[in-house]
Image (tube, grey):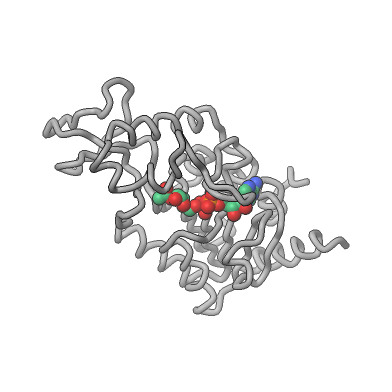
């Protein structure tokens, strides 16, 4: 058995023996669908000469909301052409199989590809690129084409993307649900995330602190690697179907 086969077989054994699973995903799970990651391969995403942390920030919403809309329209254009890959589909199938008492998917992604794959009850920690929120009355709406920034149908104030930006708090209820799912999981799968953004990056630690195991899937080493029980250095679209013993797995 190669090192990869052995590691994957051990991870599969853990998954098969688990009753409660939490899955934390990041941009890497959507990479094979064609959605660019923020970091990885020693590079960081830059658009119009600006780092994404500056574009996706609370300060930019205050100072230049039209630019924020341009940036998110640009990202939506890329994401809109993408479809779920074998990794998203494997997670959806595992949830639908009913083999686990808990199967909680928690994502940092805003692309909506987990739901498109058929996953339900996904905790979207960082919001959703296809939704908008009023900057004044906080009304939520689906995104429509046309005027930028769109006007709130209730109060007429400008709308912004319904995405959590740097310098903003996450929805407290979502975070609490994610923490509970991680703390009660026998196995936490950490898929395609650099593990650099709080509070998502503390979820695997909650699983370990309560006696569960952590399996990381990422082609690169991350800050979470040395805290994982098993780290599979490979792409998620290849590994996830294998972990859940799905018929089409390579
Ligand atoms: P990053 O872009 O920071 O990390 C992506 C990770 O995916 C890297 O560790 C890659 O090695 C890995 N990766 C690349 N291709 C992969 C593949 N095919 N299979 C598995 N892994 C792969 O993305 P996140 O960790 O999601 O937040 O970033 C966290 C947050 O930072 C994002 O949600 C976003 C950003 O700021 C907001 O916008 C609020």
The answer to whether residue 107 is seen in the rendering is no
Residue drawn at the location 44% of the way across and 30% of the way down: 74
Residue situated in front as seen by the camera: 152 or 168? 168
Residue situated in front as seen by the camera: 87 or 148? 148
Residue 125 at x, y = what percent?
A: 40, 53
Vertical arrangement, residue 3 with respect to residue 36, above or below: below
Residue situated in front as seen by the camera: 168 or 81? 168
Q: Locate residue 193: give its quadrant.
A: bottom right
The answer to whether residue 56 is seen in the rendering is yes
Residue drawn at the location 74% of the way across and 43% of the way down: 248
Residue 210 at x, y = what percent?
A: 50, 79
Residue drawn at the location 49% of the way across and 40% of the way down: 46
Residue 203 at x, y = what percent?
A: 47, 66
Residue 19 at x, y = what percent?
A: 57, 67
Vertical arrangement, residue 64 with respect to residue 150, above or below: below
- Quadrant into which the N terminus falls: bottom right
């Amino acid at each position: 058995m190669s090192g990869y086969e052995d590691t994957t077989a051990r991870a599969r054994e853990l998954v098969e023996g688990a009753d409660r699973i939490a899955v934390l995903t990041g941009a890497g799970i959507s990479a094979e669908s064609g959605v660019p990651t923020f970091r990885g391969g020693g590079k960081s995403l830059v658009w119009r000469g600006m780092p994404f942390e500056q574009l996706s920030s609370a300060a930019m919403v205050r100072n230049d909301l039209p630019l924020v809309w341009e940036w998110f329209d640009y990202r939506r254009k890329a994401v809109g052409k993408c479809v779920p890959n074998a990794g998203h589909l494997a997670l959806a199938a595992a949830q639908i199989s009913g083999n686990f008492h808990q199967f909680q998917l928690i994502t940092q992604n805003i692309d909506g590809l987990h739901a498109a794959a058929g996953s339900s009850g996904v905790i979207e920690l960082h919001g959703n690129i296809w939704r908008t929120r009023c900057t004044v009355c906080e009304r939520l709406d689906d995104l429509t084409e046309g005027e930028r920034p769109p006007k709130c149908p209730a109060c007429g104030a400008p709308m912004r993307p319904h995405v959590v930006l740097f310098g903003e708090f996450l929805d407290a209820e979502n975070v609490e649900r994610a923490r509970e799912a991680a703390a009660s999981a026998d196995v936490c799968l950490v898929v395609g995330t650099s593990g650099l953004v709080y509070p998502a990056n503390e979820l695997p630690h909650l699983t370990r602190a309560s006696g569960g195991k952590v399996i990381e899937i990422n082609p690169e080493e991350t800050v979470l690697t040395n805290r994982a029980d098993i780290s599979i250095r490979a792409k998620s679209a290849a590994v996830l179907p294998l972990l859940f013993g799905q018929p089409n797995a390579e």
